[in-house]
Amino acid sequence: MTDKPLSQGEFVALMAMLFATIALSIDAMLPALPDIAATLSPGAPNAAQLVVTSFVLGMGIGTLFAGPLSDTFGRKPVIIAGSGLYALAAVACYFAPTLETLLIARVVQGLGAAAPRTVSIAMIRDLFSGREMARLMSFVMMVFTAVPAIAPLLGQGIIALADWHAIFLAYIAFSGLTMLWLGLRQPDTLAPQHRRSLHLSALVAATRELAAHRIVLTSTLLQALTLGALFATLSSIQPIFEIVHDRAESFPLWFALIAVASMSGSFLNSRIVMTWGMRSVVRATYAAQLALTLVALGLLSVLEGNASFAVQVIWSIGLFAMMGLTMGNLNALAMEPVGHIAGLAASVISALATVGSVLLAIPVGLAFNGTATPLLVGVAVLMGLALLLSRRALGDARA
């Protein structure tokens, strides 16, 4: 291990890989949903979607613990411990005999994955703040987006060579390699003298401080609405491509195209956020996504065949690009006034946003009826609420 700070390029790449634990854990499962349904829930194929949202639920709960623990014990030990839990849960997933057992193991896997996802945000805040943090988060999101581009292809390849159970072995290998990189190359970003007590009174006081900042509350609600749209889409996109558009075999390739194209959102944000400000970018993005969703709803009601599929792909690119134009900015806005409690702040914000997003996403995903309409209607509602909230409560547009 070295105490020398990483170059910004290597730091961005490492943070992106920590983030990518989440993307890999979700997106590599998408091609497996039909096989999981056929194997474990043949009478209720829609229930296989819960493999996605159960993981997200566990991640949301886990974020409540990962950040405070990292404020006390340091960033690196907590990430490594969480990754160990993640790997053990992947073993349980591999051997799960029923859907219920698999879902429980996925919740535990999400608990472990919360550490790299949440504590990496605290590590970035330890070193950067404000628009510079938002800019760095944009670069992290650009690198991170490469994983969703290849994850479904990886999942499909593993299924072809073995079966869907073996995907969980790939999760173990990825986590091990990332932890080796972190352990050998990245110094802990939280010095011992800056670590906080884990006493309940200290945690309660810090949480009250978070609640006193309006921007933290607003950002958390906006993240929940944004992630709700994302997880609803991830739950529904594979069956939409398979059933609505008859593209089951080519789904991983199309998903890769969508992921690569959506990198434009992060790239665009990195170029304009320093000039426009985080709030203006967020508001404009919600307005554009709402308009795109309403147009897509209208077009999909009259178009068929390749034209309908083209609309679906363009809409999906817009939805995923929205993440790069909003989430980094929202995280930076929320973390700006609470850098002295960055770990706990990242935990509480991520936990509330993630659990809230699951509650929003599950009914949208389960409403799938053989068309894309329930998904687009659900996303339109979420984007409408996000636009209204961002206009009324996000604060001064110059920042």
Image (cartoon, rainbow, N blue to C red):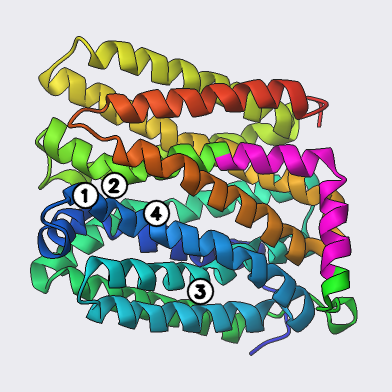
In this rendering, the answer to whether 52 lies above or below 368 is: below
Residue appearing at x 21%, y 71% in the figure:
98
Image mark for residue 112: 3
Q: Position of residue 293 (x, y in %)?
A: 40, 20
> x and y percent of residue 224 in the render?
58, 42
| Residue 75 relative to residue 338: left or right | left
Q: From which residue to which does the magenta span run?
A: 203-224
- Residue 30: x and y in percent read 26, 54
Residue visible at 35% across and 73% down?
171
Query: In this picture, is 312 found above or below 231?
Result: above
- Marks 1/3: CA–CA distance: 26 Å
Tell me the distance, in whole angstroms, between the alpha carbons under discs 3 and 4.
Answer: 15 Å
Q: Which residue is mark 1?
A: 252
Q: CA distance from mark 4 to mark 2?
A: 21 Å
Residue 256: give its label. 2
User: Given contact means CB atoms under 8 Å apart, are the residues at marks 1 and 2 in contact?
Assistant: yes
Residue situated in front as seen by the camera: 222 or 312: 222
Q: Which dot, 4 or 2, sits closer to the camera? A: 4
Badge 1 marks a residue whose secondary structure is: helix
- The kind of residue tagged 2 is Ala
